[in-house]
Image (tube, helix red, strand yellow):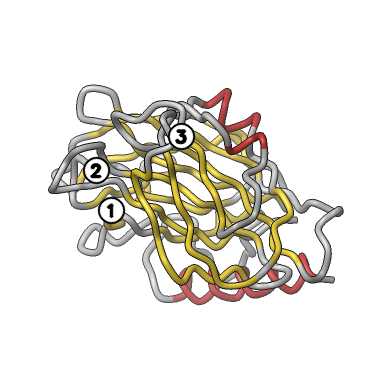
Amino acid sequence: MKNYRLFNFIAIAVATFLLSSCLKDNDDQRIPRAIFTMVNGYADANAVIYYADGGSLQNPYYPLDFKSYSQVGLFTGARKIAISSEYNSVLLDTTITIKDSTIYTSFVYGSKSKPVQVITTDRINKDIKDTESGVRFFNLAEGTDQVTLQIGDQASPTEWSNRGKETQSSATAHQGFIAQKSGTYTIVAKDKAGKTIASRKDVKLAENYYYSLILIGKANDQKTPLYIGLVAQAAN
């Protein structure tokens, strides 16, 4: 039941968003067949706008800010997902097949010279207990290599050790959620020498919920320093 509670909560939020916006996929007579989460880790613009088949998934006057995320509903079929910067400069696009009753997340990151988008399919992990949270980690930061993430004093899973900057292949390989004890923690990212390069205090991981922890920003940069983001995820 835990995944259904989370799915229903996100679905209600998505429905509310759709009813208050002017998205191409907004149709009062139809129900969106999938949930699509958009995560902005692109540090070279203040904000981005997502499009599906040319229709914006954010109000152009209220784009998706850096360090933020949003969820919408998408109909099924082949959908061209494009992302532009706040100045209408198209960063990249890709076509994916949206399947019925499936949950996806798009992460945009990289730099002006090489923007990157990876898309995950978000599934529950049936081995996660009621006292645990489902967590995964993606290294989306610029200028980092072999990053290891640790939650409190819990041992870092092998999958979270020595992670390079993500590609679609690595993101797909690590899109599964790993069981972690629920609670409130300090989360630390370390480089290959064991030096702390980013940390975040008082991160709450609620029981029966799923999360992505993401390292974004740029190493040794004052404007957009390395930052550990927390994305609440739906999964089914």
Q: Earlier in the sequence, mark 2 or mark 3?
A: 2
Image marks 2 and 1: residues in contact by CB distance under 8 Å: yes
Q: Position of residue 225 (x, y in %)?
A: 23, 47
> Crowdedness of circle 1 by 10 Å Cα count: few (<14), some, many (20+)?
many
Q: Locate the C terminus and report the quarter of the image it occupies.
A: bottom right
Q: Secondary structure at mark 1?
A: loop
**Placement of 144 over or under 21, stated as above or below:** above
Residue that label 3 marks = 147
User: Gap between marks 2 and 3, in whole Å?
Assistant: 18 Å
Q: Nearer the viewer, residue 234 or 166?
A: 166
Tell me which corner region of the image, top left, top right, bottom left or bottom right, holds residue 219. Answer: top left
**Structural crowding at the residue carrying mark 3, measured as other residues with C-alpha within 10 Å and reported as few (<14), some (14–19) or many (≥20):** many
Q: Is residue 164 left or right of residue 131?
A: left
From the image, tell me which residue sits under label 2: 43
**Residue 7, how many percent across, how many down?**
69, 66
Amino acid type of the residue that numbered disc 1 sits on in the rendered structure: Phe
Tell me which amino acid carries mark 3. Answer: Val
Quarter of the image containing the N terminus?
bottom right
Q: Residue at x 64, y 64 (%)?
A: 31
